[in-house]
Image (cartoon, helix red, strand yellow):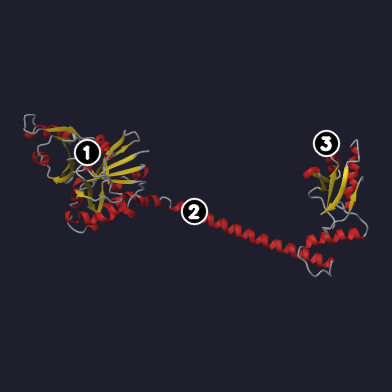
Amino acid sequence: MTTLYIRYPAKASVEHGAAQSCPFALVGEGGNLLQQGADALGNLGERVAAARRVVLLLAASDVTLLRVKVPPMSAARLKEALPGLVEEHVLGDPADCVLAAAAVAGEDGLRAVAVVQRAWLEVLVKALLAQGAHSVSVLPAQLCLPFQPGTVTAALTSGDGGLELTLRQSQSEGLGLAIASQPAAALQTVRALAGDAPVSLYLPAAQIPLFAALPEAQADAPHPVALLEDHWSHWVSAARSAPLDLAPALGASGANARRWQQWRWPLRIAIAALLVNIAGINMEWIRLKREAEGIRTAMLQTFRAAYPKETVILDPAAQMRKNIGLAKADSGQAGPDDFGAIAAALGESLSVLPRKDVIASLDYREHALQVKLKPNMVDGNALAQVRSALAARRLDLTEGPGGAWQIKLLAGTGTGAKDGGKQGNAGGKP
């Protein structure tokens, strides 16, 4: 999980034809520096795509920081109101700028607002997204310098077009200038912008001796400037607590666009697979429907051939079973679920009991024999013996309310005619 920090040069130096050499640093999750260097933005594609997050430090001279009085309002309403609030502070149309406000106001009640040219920022963010950036943040470089209350922090970096001055005056104030490569003039400019406040100036290690020899940096000067070696650690540390991020203010052109782009092909593949599965399921359903219709047609033809006088055919299989059962009954052949067959099987099963006079009454309905027992005549052991004997004859015994038995054919065993009527009633001993 790495973060790639890129310091982009000032827009003015790029427009004047200077080489776009961007210092970069690859930082691990714990803040350790893994790699650093300088290269053109277009040559950082592999590093951009490999990093979990890309943080672009926009040159301080390209970002204007304002202090604006903002009435209490929601974030959505603040976004709509920002162009009107900064209109008098911005040259040109605020609609052509990206506006980002700090989440909270300062002690003086003023809210920090960053302003940058929209077209310029969109070009940079889209260039990073095109190289495979997963998440992009854009921070003003002046807010990525270390800051101590009551002091001013500055940094001078060398570019192909001269020196770039980055100055941080408070928690949410700072500015940037592009100046000529003249150490004395640069140091005087830093001192003038800082006023009477102590100044910490970060410089490349090779330039510290050159600036240290200047009068403004001497210890006996009225306002000496502390010269410190510039390195990535303080930029990274301060960037993590920067109060403003310009990327979300870009909307659909910002970092969220890449998140949708990276799911574009997986979503297409998932939709295609879903359509293929739906088509396959529908084809299988059509095949099974045709097969069912063919089977039903064959059953109707067989039924009509066997019973040509039947005019109403709702369920050929059920009507066939009923007619076969009726035919067996007419010929004197008892079905396995007739009253006589079940009663006979019950009488044989009761032979396992010490006493046979346990039945109070028999009732036959719905192809099942209802047996009412005499009180306290059959215990659990006797019930288990009778149930086992009936199971051997393909009959099932279930005990209902009041100790009554219901005896019927086991599930899956063929039955005879299903006339549903009451076929017999007997009382006393079998």
Residue beneath disc 3: 379
Residue beneath disc 2: 269
Residue beneath disc 1: 145
Sequence-wise, which precedes: disc 1 or disc 3? 1
Instruction: Give the distance between the C-alpha atoms of the residues marked 3 and 2, in whole angstroms.
Output: 67 Å
Q: Which numbered disc, 1 or 3, marks the residue closer to the eye? A: 3
Mark 3, Cα crowd under 10 Å, few <14 / some 14-19 / many 20+, is: few
Q: Residue furthest right?
A: 332
User: Residue flagged by tag 3: what amino acid is it?
Assistant: Asp
Residue 291 point in image, percent of width and height: 70, 61
- The count of marks equals 3
User: Residue flagged by tag 1: what amino acid is it?
Assistant: Leu
User: Residue flagged by tag 2: what amino acid is it?
Assistant: Ile
Sequence-wise, which precedes: disc 1 or disc 2? 1
The correct choice, above or below, for 391 with respect to 120 in the image is above
Nearest the viewer among 180 and 77 is: 77
Tell me, yes or no, whether the two marked residues, 3 and 2, touch with CB atoms within 8 Å.
no
Nearest the viewer among 188 and 48 is: 188
